[in-house]
């Protein structure tokens, strides 16, 4: 499918009925429970997601945050079980993803390609999205840090075609998108918005957690989805 990130994120941010429409589009009913208690490494098929929570962390500007610490990170928590089986403490997938701004993402992925960390297809996919993005959009590549044990694989393993986009102005997120892609012409996006300063219980987020977006695709709880 053709994927225009600007148009897609704009649609998500300005459509209060997005979750309902997406639920109808995906026709999500009650998928089978996860068969393993070990959280998956790579992202599961987006179409199996029933509940999603994205939390934006702001570590502060230069001179405030620790050396080499990124300004923004997003922690994604995902459930794939039907509403009646969901336990919030037992998510099926969770990752914290560093956000890279529009101005820096191209040089970053060029470096990763040149090192062989991502392949040419993944580079082309990201570059295609970058070309149609704008300066408000931040990219987060999904992966896992290497094994620090003796003889373990070092560096970061990035999972092919799996990334997030966050449309953000002056540290305030407007919308987000979780993307799976196989190449520059095949994308499967899942949008989430709006973002809230509060958790599902109505309490203000604490510490470096600034905003949270929650997407309910299975009628889990009327207070879950952000409004």
Image (cartoon, rainbow, N blue to C red):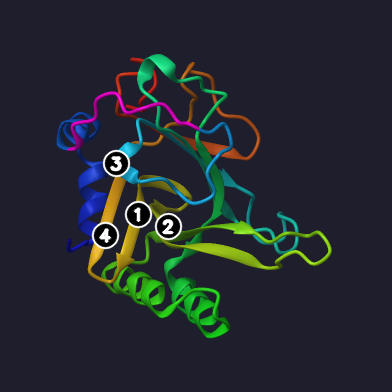
Image quadrant in which the N terminus is located: bottom left
Q: Nearer the viewer, residue 207 or 165?
A: 165
Q: Which mark is residue 187?
A: 4
Please name the residue that numbered disc 1 is placed on.
Answer: 179
Q: What's the CA distance linking mark 2 and mark 3?
A: 15 Å
* Of marks 3 and 4, the one in the foreground: 3
Residue at point 59% right, 37% down? 38
For disc 3, the marked residue is 47
Mark 3, other Cα within 10 Å: few <14 / some 14–19 / many ≥20: some
Q: Which residues are magenta?
A: 26-35
Examine the image and state in which quarter residue 63 appears. Answer: bottom right
Query: Residue 166: horizontal and vertical position, in percent?
Result: 40, 52
**Residue 162 in the image, given as x and y percentages of width and height:** 42, 58
Tell me, for residue 167, which label it has, or none. Answer: none
Q: Is residue 29 above or below residue 223?
A: below
Gap between marks 3 and 4 measured at Cα? 12 Å
């Amino acid at each position: 499918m053709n994927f225009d990130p600007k148009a897609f994120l704009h649609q998500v941010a300005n459509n209060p009925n997005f979750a309902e429409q997406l639920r109808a589009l995906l026709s999500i009913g009650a998928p089978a429970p996860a068969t393993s208690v070990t959280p998956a490494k790579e992202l599961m098929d987006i179409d199996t997601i029933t509940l999603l929570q994205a939390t934006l962390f702001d570590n502060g500007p230069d001179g405030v945050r620790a050396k080499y610490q990124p300004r923004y990170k997003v922690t994604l928590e995902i459930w794939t079980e039907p509403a009646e089986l969901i336990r919030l403490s037992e998510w099926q997938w969770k990752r914290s993803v560093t956000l890279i701004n529009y101005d820096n993402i191209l040089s970053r992925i060029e470096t990763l390609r040149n090192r062989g960390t991502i392949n040419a297809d993944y580079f082309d996919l990201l570059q295609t999205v970058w070309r149609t993005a704008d300066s408000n959009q931040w990219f987060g590549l999904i992966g896992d840090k290497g094994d620090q044990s003796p003889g373990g694989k070092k560096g970061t393993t990035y999972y092919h075609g799996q990334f997030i986009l966050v449309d953000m102005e002056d540290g305030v997120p407007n919308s987000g998108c979780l993307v799976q892609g196989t190449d520059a012409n095949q994308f499967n996006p899942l949008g989430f918005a709006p973002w809230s300063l509060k958790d599902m219980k109505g309490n203000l987020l604490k510490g470096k957690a600034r905003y949270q977006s929650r997407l309910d695709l299975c009628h889990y709880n009327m207070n879950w989805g952000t409004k």
